[in-house]
Amino acid sequence: MESSPPPPDIFVESPYCNHPGLSPIEKEVLWEYAKLAENLKQLKQKTRSLTAQPDTLLLARLRAVENKMGLILTLFKASVWGVINEQNVADPLSLDLTSETLR
């Protein structure tokens, strides 16, 4: 298996500059497309490298947020429980004792 020679730096020199069948504007447009294609290739490589390994800093931050959310949920439940208990203690006579319905 033969490896092809490395392509010239697409951002420095246009591969279409010496093509006799193209007008100058066509050469420029094709060069811009070639640069765009190379940028997309580099972007794809970088995103693959980023997704291939876990981000330890992000994981640590998410664990801290998860712990804080658990604490917030516990405090919220406790405050709701406190409000419910205060209502029951504050109005013990608010029960309808005149009703003769068995419950």
Image: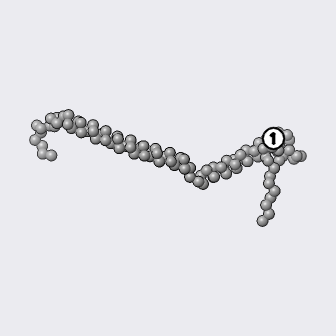
Residue in the image at 38% along x and 43% along y: 71
In the foreground, 43 or 61: 61
Q: Position of residue 5 (x, y in %)?
A: 81, 56
Lateral position of residue 82 relative to residue 5, left or right:
left
Tell me if 78 is positioned left or right of 96 in this view: right
Q: Position of residue 90 (x, y in %)?
A: 20, 34
Number of callouts in the render?
1
Quadrant position of the N terminus in the picture:
bottom right
Residue at the spot 18% in from the left edge and 34% down from the top edge: 91
Q: Which residue is mark 1?
A: 28
Question: x, y (%) of residue 39?
Answer: 71, 46
Residue 39 relative to residue 73: left or right: right
Is residue 101 visible in the rendered image? The answer is yes
Residue 8 placement, left or right of 101 = right
Residue 97 image position (x, y, % from top left): 12, 38
Residue at 67% in and 51% down = 45
Q: In the image, what residue occupies the spot 60% across and 54% down?
A: 52
Q: Depth check: 26 or 28 in front?
A: 28
The answer to whether residue 88 is above or below residue 60 is above
In the figure, residue 31 lies in which quadrant?
top right
State the residue in front, 51 or 44: 51
Q: Label 1: few (<14), some or many (≥20) within 10 Å?
A: some
Q: Amino acid at mark 1?
A: Glu
